Image: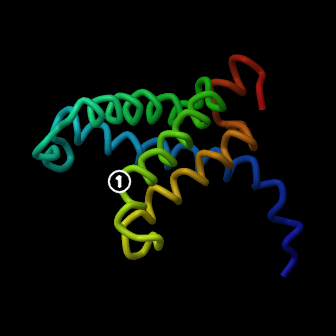
């Protein structure tokens, strides 16, 4: 197979990854604040309210591709903190401590921080950033 033919699609695929990660992350914040699409956690601590705000604001910014690198950096750090506070104390292994999603989000956001928003973004169109 000629994989070189796929290379022109890489920037657009980056945009799709960013949009999907933003929408999926947004759900977690909406759950905490609105109980949608799943019921909110029973005990909402102050830390979970801050987490929910980062998920909503960051999810929206990432989805539309506005201030993408800043949002992705904050969200990657947020997921690293969430992993080490909520999951790591239960076990070293993410499969055992249910931290797979936090680790994956962390590295996806870190990749987006370095790679940029892609061509289908407000940053690209408005601010001429890549």
Task: Choose between 89 and 29: the one closer to the eye.
Answer: 89
Q: Residue at 83% across / 54% down in the picture?
A: 8
Q: Could you say where residue 50 lies in the image, as x and y percent from the top left? A: 33, 29
Q: Residue 5 lies in what quarter of the image?
A: bottom right
Count of labels in the image: 1
Task: Choose between 45 and 128: the one closer to the eye.
Answer: 45
Q: Residue 15 lies in what quarter of the image?
A: top right
Q: Which residue is mark 1?
A: 86
Q: Could you say where residue 81 lies in the image, as x and y percent from the top left? A: 47, 45
Q: Could you say where residue 88 lies in the image, as x and y percent from the top left? A: 42, 61
Residue, far top: 127
Task: Judge from the rendering whether residue 41 lies leftward or rightward of residue 72; answer left or right.
Answer: left
Image quadrant for the C terminus? Answer: top right
Q: Residue at 55% across / 33% down in the picture?
A: 74
Image quadrant for the N terminus? Answer: bottom right
Task: Choose between 121 and 79: the one closer to the eye.
Answer: 79
Is the residue marked by circle 1 packed among few (<14), some (14-19), or many (20+) residues within 10 Å?
few
Task: Judge from the rendering whether residue 54 lies leftward or rightward of residue 9; answer left or right.
Answer: left
Above or below — where is 50 with respect to 96? above
Q: Residue at 45% across / 36% down in the picture?
A: 59
């Amino acid at each position: 197979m000629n994989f070189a033919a796929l290379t022109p699609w890489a920037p657009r695929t980056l945009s799709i990854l960013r949009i999907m990660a933003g929408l999926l992350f947004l759900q977690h914040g909406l759950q905490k604040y609105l109980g949608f699409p799943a019921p909110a956690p029973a005990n909402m601590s102050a830390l979970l309210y801050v987490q929910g705000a980062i998920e909503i604001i960051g999810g929206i910014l990432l989805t539309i591709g506005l201030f993408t690198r800043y949002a992705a950096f904050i969200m990657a750090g947020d997921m690293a903190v969430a992993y080490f506070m909520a999951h790591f104390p239960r076990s070293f292994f993410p499969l055992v401590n249910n931290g797979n999603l936090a680790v994956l989000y962390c590295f996806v956001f870190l990749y987006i921080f370095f790679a940029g928003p892609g061509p289908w973004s407000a940053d690209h169109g408005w601010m001429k950033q890549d």
